[in-house]
């Protein structure tokens, strides 16, 4: 599906090419203006659930994904006084995609990314970049970074990042 966003309406194009308007979820009270960055990303990644940024005093980094609400809307907390970078938005969107699509998306990712063995065999490690879901999120973040950024999966496994393959993977998720 292809989604085109207005402020509070989403136009969803069905596989038959028919365009149907769908009302966006009611925003929470303290929704941030820069939630638009998320809606822009939804145009590139149709599988990405609707999301809002809320301002919080988060303890870690510039943003955190804190799950899907009962309507399936992604809850993203942005640190007060710190506008999110494209990288942060992409990274948190990666977590939302795993929450929305389920853990099997990690197997698809593992194969497409050419990581060693299977996700289940992966021994892990002590750092955040050893965690498979963090690798998935960070590889989406890397699409917003200039070439040369070494994403978690490359740091953990040494397997180089292929921007074209990863761009196609995230766009093609269903
Ligand atoms: Zn993360």
Image (spheres, rainbow, N blue to C red):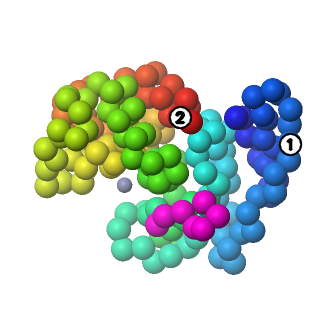
For the residue pair 118 and 55, the one nearer the viewer reads as: 118
Residue 163 in the image, given as x and y percentages of width and height:
42, 25
Residue 117 as seen in the image, left or right of residue 102: left
Instruction: Name the residue carrying label 2.
Output: 173
Residue found at x 64% / y 54%? 50
- Residue 58 among magenta residues: no
* Quadrant showing the N terminus: top right
Between discs 1 and 2, the one toward the N terminus: 1
Q: Residues within 10 Å of mark 1 (few under 14, many from 20)?
A: few
Instruction: Choose top left, top right, bottom left or bottom right for residue 18.
Output: top right
Is mark 1 in CB contact (under 8 Å) with mark 2? no
What is the count of numbered marks? 2
**Image side of residue 110 versus residue 47, left or right:** left
Q: Tell me if residue 121 comes above or below residue 73 in the rendering.
A: above
Residue 45 image offset from top left, x and y in percent: 59, 38
**Residue 76: x percent and y percent?**
53, 64
Label 2 beta carbon within 8 A of ligand 1: no
Residue at 39% x, 32% y is 108
The quarter of the image holding the C terminus is: top right
Which residue range is magenta in the image? 66-72
Q: Residues within 10 Å of mark 2 (few under 14, many from 20)?
A: some
């Amino acid at each position: 599906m292809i989604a085109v966003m207005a402020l509070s309406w989403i136009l969803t194009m069905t596989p038959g090419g028919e365009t149907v308007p769908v009302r966006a979820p009611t925003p929470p009270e303290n929704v941030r203006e820069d939630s638009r960055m998320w809606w822009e990303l939804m145009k590139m990644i149709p599988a990405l659930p609707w999301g809002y940024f809320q301002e919080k005093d988060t303890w870690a980094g510039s943003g955190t994904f804190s799950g899907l609400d009962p309507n399936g809307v992604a809850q993203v907390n942005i640190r007060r006084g710190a506008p999110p970078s494209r990288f942060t938005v992409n990274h948190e969107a990666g977590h939302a995609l795993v929450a929305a699509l389920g853990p099997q998306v990690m197997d698809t990712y593992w194969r497409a990314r050419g990581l060693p063995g299977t996700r289940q065999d992966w021994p892990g490690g002590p750092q955040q970049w050893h965690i498979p879901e963090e690798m998935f999120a960070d590889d989406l973040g890397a699409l917003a970074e200039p070439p040369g950024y070494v994403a978690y999966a490359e740091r953990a496994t040494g397997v180089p990042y292929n921007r074209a393959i990863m761009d196609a993977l995230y766009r093609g998720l269903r």
